[in-house]
Image (cartoon, rainbow, N blue to C red):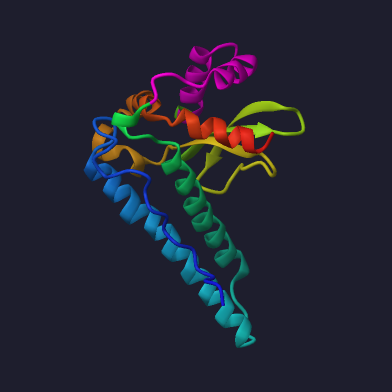
């Protein structure tokens, strides 16, 4: 029978490979503690629900399903986030020309896109994520604020780029300089992956 559990994906780079923008300590705690916790919690909740079903027992649907969506959302978004980053030594200096054109058609130019992306990240209420998504119904790129891991995700919008705006993503390296974190993470975005995601849905 196939494995029904969620698994922590292997990082596509080493712990030191994102320095100086993200330190080894920051990355290790983020990945091993926080992301791994979402994976473990998701599996535990599913096991609890399965057990209740087999025993014909009830479970607190409101609490368990809310927690499940939070933890699965955290796992999925973190998995996308790691792919969005590229080791400093392999950093691509140029962004694919077709991607520059696509972003410019939607945001006027790359400079404005960067500004709007950072503003969206900085203005999230509480903890969450900022994402660049594609709406296939309108053929538009749309910035999305995702509160926590699972609130305000629009159905059927494909995520091309996602950046973690939770405090655990930056506090060791940047303390209260959240804006500096978003400025610096721009330097290690994997534009090739971002464009590949767009190509796969078009």
Determine whether, in the image, residue 188 is placed left or right of residue 55: left
Residue 57 visible in image: no
Residue 63 visible in the displayed image: yes
Judged left or right of residue 98, residue 6 is left
At a point 64% along the width and 18% down the height, the residue shown is: 106
Between residues 67 and 192, which one lies in front from this camera angle?
Answer: 192
Q: Quadrant of the C terminus?
A: top right
Judge left or right: residue 35 versus residue 52: left
Q: Position of residue 187 (x, y in %)?
A: 36, 24
Q: Quadrant of the N terminus?
A: bottom right
Above/below status of 91 relative to 53: above
Image quadrant in which you'd find residue 89: top left
Location of residue 115 with respect to 12 vertically, above or below: above
Residue for point 75% across, 28% down: 138
Question: Residue 149: where, in percent of width, then height?
Answer: 51, 48
Residue at 34 percent across and 50 percent down: it is 31
Residue toward you, 26 or 18: 18
Magenta segment, principal secondary structure?
helix
- Look at the image and give the residue range highlighted in magenta: 92-121
Looking at the image, is 23 positioned above or below residue 95?
below
Q: Is residue 108 one of those drawn in magenta?
A: yes
Residue 116's x, y, as percent?
52, 20
Furthest residue toward right: 137
The picture places residue 52, in percent across and down from the top left corner, at 58, 81
- Whether residue 43 is in magenta: the answer is no
């Amino acid at each position: 029978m196939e494995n029904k559990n969620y698994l922590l994906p292997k990082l596509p780079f080493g712990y030191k490979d994102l320095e100086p923008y993200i330190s080894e300590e920051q990355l290790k705690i983020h990945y091993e503690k926080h992301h791994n916790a979402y994976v473990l919690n998701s599996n535990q909740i599913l096991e609890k629900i399965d057990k209740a079903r087999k025993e014909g027992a009830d479970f607190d649907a409101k609490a368990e399903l809310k927690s499940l969506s939070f933890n699965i959302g955290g796992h999925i978004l973190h998995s996308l986030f790691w792919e969005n980053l590229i080791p400093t030594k392999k950093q691509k200096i140029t962004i694919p020309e077709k991607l520059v054109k696509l972003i410019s058609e939607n945001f006027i130019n790359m400079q404005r896109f960067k500004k709007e992306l950072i503003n969206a990240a900085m203005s999230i209420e509480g903890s969450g994520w900022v994402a660049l998504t594609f709406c296939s119904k309108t053929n538009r790129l749309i910035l999305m604020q995702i509160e926590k891991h699972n609130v305000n995700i629009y159905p059927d919008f494909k995520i091309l780029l996602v950046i973690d705006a939770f405090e655990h993503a930056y506090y060791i390296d940047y303390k209260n300089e959240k804006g500096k974190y978003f400025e610096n993470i721009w330097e290690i975005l994997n534009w090739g992956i971002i464009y590949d995601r767009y190509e796969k849905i078009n």
